[in-house]
Amino acid sequence: MRVSRVFAVLVMSATLVMAAVPANGALTDGLQQAVAGAEELSAPKPAWYTAQLHAKVVEAGDRGEGVPLPDGVTYPSSGLAFTGIRPGAWMIAPAGCTMNFVFGQAPNYYIGTAGHCTEPGDEVTIFAAPGLLMNIGKTVKSVDNGVGDDFALVEIRPEMAEHVNPSMTYFGGPTGQGSPESGDIVEHAGHGLVIGTGGTPRAGVVAYRGPGDERRSDAFSWAGAASPGDSGSPVRLADGTAAGDLTHLVVGEPYAPGAVAGTSIERMLKIAGKPLATAPDGPDPAS
């Protein structure tokens, strides 16, 4: 499995670097960067999503409509009972990722994902329901500066505002802006390959909150499970408030013992420049 290979390489690299750390524990900038290995968690666009199909889905999107999945295409549907344009929706183009929180208000809605999943101008397509593809709009902002500064904002077509639900799949919320700190329980729902196939809920414990790969970044890590396709996933705290998004597998300092990391909701809101759309705490399958 790809994730196993990636994680094994990261662990081996971190072990070799730590062996060279001085006895006083001090790290040079180069060693610190090497220890903090990270792997983005996007997946490829499905091969069956051809240019011809994309054009058809975009044309339907201009009318505020979706397009049925072509005959003969098989896909995991376990998490698609939570329909609509919402946190935890499955993004299939331009990459295989997961949508996170909704921003703004009707009819001017936006939705987030990871910055490394899409670039400004990209037309974004999701599974809006089992067997239904929907081109929801275009990416208007994308920041891809590594752990703690990795977020993109997609402007949702006004014609599709009726399909927007700010409630996170499985869990509900976000009830507001949270602040993940060490020891907190966090929950996410994403479409990672194998362990997240079709969209599955997972939980973990926060191990780190602080700077990430860049000076202005705001990262957090947790001990949990993730795989390619989970990038962009919404992450909430147990109290229902938004924690941030999931973007990377990580190993070593400063994130250890966390294995999964992302960008805080505080940093996401600064990038978005839009208010967070909230929802009651508790599952809401309605689209």
Image: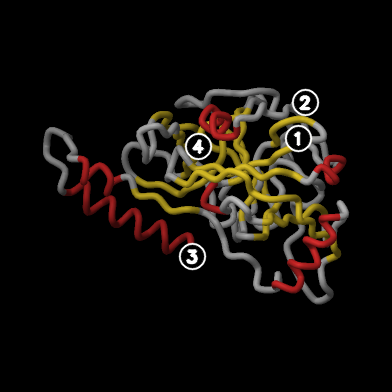
Separation of marks 3 and 1 at Cα, in angstroms: 31 Å
Percent across and percent down for residue 216 are 40, 32
Lower position in the chain sequence, tag 2 or tag 1: 1
What SS does tag 4 mark?
strand
The amino acid marked with disc number 3 is Arg
Numbered tag placed on residue 280 in the rendering: 2
Q: Residues within 10 Å of mark 4 (few under 14, many from 20)?
A: many
Residue at 59% x, 50% y is 120
Is residue 43 rendered to the left or right of residue 161? left
Numbered tag placed on residue 2 in the rendering: 3
Q: Nearer the viewer, mark 3 or mark 1?
A: 1
Q: Residue furthest left?
A: 23
Lower position in the chain sequence, tag 3 or tag 1: 3
Q: Are marks 2 and 1 in contact (CB under 8 Å)?
A: yes
- Residue designated by label 4: 263
- Residue designated by label 1: 167
Q: Are marks 4 and 2 in contact (CB under 8 Å)?
A: no
What SS does tag 3 mark?
helix
